[in-house]
Image: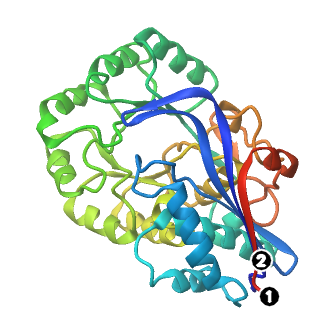
C-alpha cells in the first residue's frame, strides 16, 4: 500500500449541549481530520486531542506540527505492506500517541479498503453491533441530573456514567441510585481526587457502582493499586493507560479491575489490540471509551469495540446526541442500547464534504510523488 498523498484539516464543530467534567466545560470540539490517499482509495483518521492539555498533555497545535512536519513526511510516497510497518516507521519518536493514532487509524481504514473488508473483520471483531451506554456531564442541579438520567434510560442506554468531582459525588450518585435502583451506574472522576480523599471515595462503595473510573492522578498506577485494595467497587483505568506496557504494569500492580480502551489515547488500533490481548489473559473486562468524537472517530471506535474482550457498554452513543450535523453521511445512531457497526470496506463512512468545507478552519495538502 503506497501512501500517495495526504490532506490534513482543522475543523470546529459546536456541541448541542454544555459538557462539564472535573477539568472544565466544553461547548465545541476542535478536530484534526486526516485523509490519506493511495491506489485510488481514501483512508480517514480523526484526532481527539484538545486545544489545551487538559485530558492528556497533547494538543491540537502540537499534533498538527508533528503530522505536518514529522510523521507525514516519513510515510508519504512509501510502500507500507501493513499497519504494523507504519507503526514501525513512527517508532523512533517518543510519546504523542494521539498524534500517531490519527495517522495509524487512517492507514488502517485505507488498508482495510484495499483488502475490500470492513475494519472490524481485519481487527478480529466478532459482532455486528455494539452495546452502548451514555456519559453525562456535570449538570446544573440534582434535579437536572435526575431528569437527564431518566431521559437516557428511556432511550434504552444500557449504562449511565456520571461525571463527578469533589463536592459533586456522593449525594448526586446516591440520589440517582435511589431513583433508579436497577440502572447500571458508574462514575468518572477524570483524576479529580487524591489518595488523601480515601474516606470520600470509600463512601461510594455502598452505591452499587459497576466501577469508579480514574479517581486518581492521570499518570498514576501505584496509588490506584493502593486504593483498589481498600475499595469493593472496581476501579476502571482511563487516562493512565497509554500503552500496552502501562496496561501490563497495571495488571501486575492490581491498579484496576476494568479497563477503558480509547484507541486514540493508546496510539491507534495496533496498541489497542495488544491491550485487548493482555486484558483477556488477565480476565479484565474492557469497554470502549469516548472523546466526543465526530463520525470518523466514532466509526473507528465502533469497529474496534466488536472484539470479544469488550464486554461492558461503551461510550459510543448516538451522534445526534452531540451534533446538529455530523461530518459523515451515515447516521451513527443507537437503538435500545445497541449501535450497528457501519457496513462496507474500511470504517464504512464517507465524509460529508460540503459540510466539512464549511467548518474547516485550516487545511493542508501534501503529495508523496
Number of other residues with Cα within 10 Å of mark 2, as a class: few under 14, some 14 to 19, many 20 or more: some
User: Which of these two is toward me, 159 or 194?
Assistant: 194
Report whether residue 182 is seen. Answer: yes
| Residue 108: assigned label | none
Identify the residue at image location x=79%, y=55%: 349
- Within 10 angstroms of label 1, few (less than 14), some, or many (20 or more) residues? few
- Identified at 69% across, 38% down, the residue is 319
Question: Is label 1 in a helix, a strand or a loop?
Answer: loop
Label 2 belongs to which residue?
Answer: 5
- Residue appearing at x 18%, y 41% in the figure: 194
Query: Looking at the image, is mark 1 or mark 2 earlier in the sequence?
Result: 2
Relative image position of residue 44 (x, y in whole percent): 72, 63
The type of colouring in the image is rainbow
- Which mark is on residue 369? 1
From this view, report whether residue 103 is shown above or below residue 178.
below
Q: Name the quadrant containing residue 27.
A: top right
Residue 270 vs residue 130, the one in the foreground: 270
> In the image, 204: left or right of 117?
left
Residue 263 appears in the rendering: no
Residue 103 pos. (x, y %): 62, 70
Q: Quadrant of the N terminus?
A: bottom right
From the top left corner, tell me how far across and down residue 70 is, in percent.
56, 78
Q: Is residue 43 above or below residue 196?
A: below
Disc 1 + disc 2, Cβ < 8 Å: yes
* The residue positioned farthest toward the top in the image shown: 143
- Which quadrant: the C terminus? bottom right
Left or right placement of residue 120 versus residue 169 in this view: right
Is 139 displayed left or right of 303 in the figure? Answer: left
Amino acid at each position: 500500500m503506497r501512501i500517495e498523498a495526504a490532506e490534513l484539516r482543522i475543523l470546529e464543530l459546536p456541541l448541542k449541549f454544555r459538557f462539564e467534567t472535573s477539568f472544565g466545560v466544553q461547548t465545541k470540539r476542535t478536530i484534526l481530520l486526516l485523509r490519506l490517499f493511495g491506489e485510488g482509495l481514501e483512508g480517514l483518521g480523526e484526532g481527539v486531542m484538545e486545544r489545551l492539555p487538559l485530558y492528556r498533555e497533547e494538543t491540537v497545535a502540537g499534533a498538527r506540527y508533528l503530522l505536518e512536519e514529522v510523521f507525514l513526511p516519513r510515510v508519504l510516497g512509501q510502500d507500507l505492506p501493513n499497519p504494523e510497518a507504519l507503526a514501525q516507521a513512527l517508532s523512533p519518536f517518543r510519546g504523542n500517541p494521539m498524534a500517531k493514532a490519527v495517522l495509524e487509524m487512517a492507514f488502517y481504514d485505507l488498508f482495510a479498503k484495499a483488502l475490500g473488508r470492513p475494519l472490524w473483520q481485519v481487527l478480529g471483531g466478532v459482532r455486528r453491533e455494539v452495546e452502548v451506554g451514555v456519559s453525562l456531564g456535570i449538570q446544573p442541579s440534582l434535579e437536572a441530573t435526575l431528569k437527564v438520567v431518566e431521559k437516557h434510560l428511556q432511550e434504552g442506554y444500557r449504562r449511565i456514567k456520571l461525571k463527578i468531582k469533589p463536592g459533586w459525588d456522593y449525594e448526586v450518585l446516591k440520589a440517582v441510585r435511589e431513583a433508579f435502583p436497577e440502572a447500571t451506574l458508574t462514575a468518572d472522576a477524570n483524576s479529580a481526587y487524591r489518595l488523601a480523599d480515601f474516606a470520600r471515595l470509600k463512601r461510594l462503595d455502598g452505591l452499587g457502582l459497576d466501577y469508579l473510573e480514574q479517581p486518581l492522578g492521570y499518570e498514576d498506577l501505584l496509588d490506584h493499586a493502593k486504593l483498589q485494595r481498600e475499595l469493593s467497587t472496581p476501579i476502571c483505568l482511563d487516562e493512565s493507560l497509554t500503552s500496552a506496557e502501562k496496561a501490563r504494569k497495571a495488571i501486575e500492580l492490581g491498579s484496576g479491575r476494568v479497563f477503558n480502551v480509547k484507541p486514540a489515547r493508546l496510539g491507534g488500533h495496533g496498541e489497542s489490540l495488544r491491550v485487548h490481548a493482555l486484558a483477556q489473559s488477565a480476565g479484565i473486562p474492557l469497554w470502549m471509551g469516548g472523546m466526543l468524537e465526530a463520525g470518523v472517530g466514532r466509526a473507528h471506535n465502533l469497529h474496534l469495540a466488536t472484539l470479544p474482550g469488550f464486554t461492558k457498554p461503551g461510550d459510543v452513543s448516538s451522534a445526534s446526541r452531540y451534533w446538529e450535523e455530523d461530518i459523515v453521511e451515515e447516521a451513527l445512531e443507537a437503538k435500545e442500547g445497541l449501535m450497528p457497526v457501519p457496513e462496507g470496506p474500511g470504517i464504512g463512512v464517507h465524509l460529508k464534504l460540503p459540510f466539512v468545507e464549511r467548518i474547516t478552519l485550516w487545511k493542508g495538502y501534501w503529495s508523496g510523488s
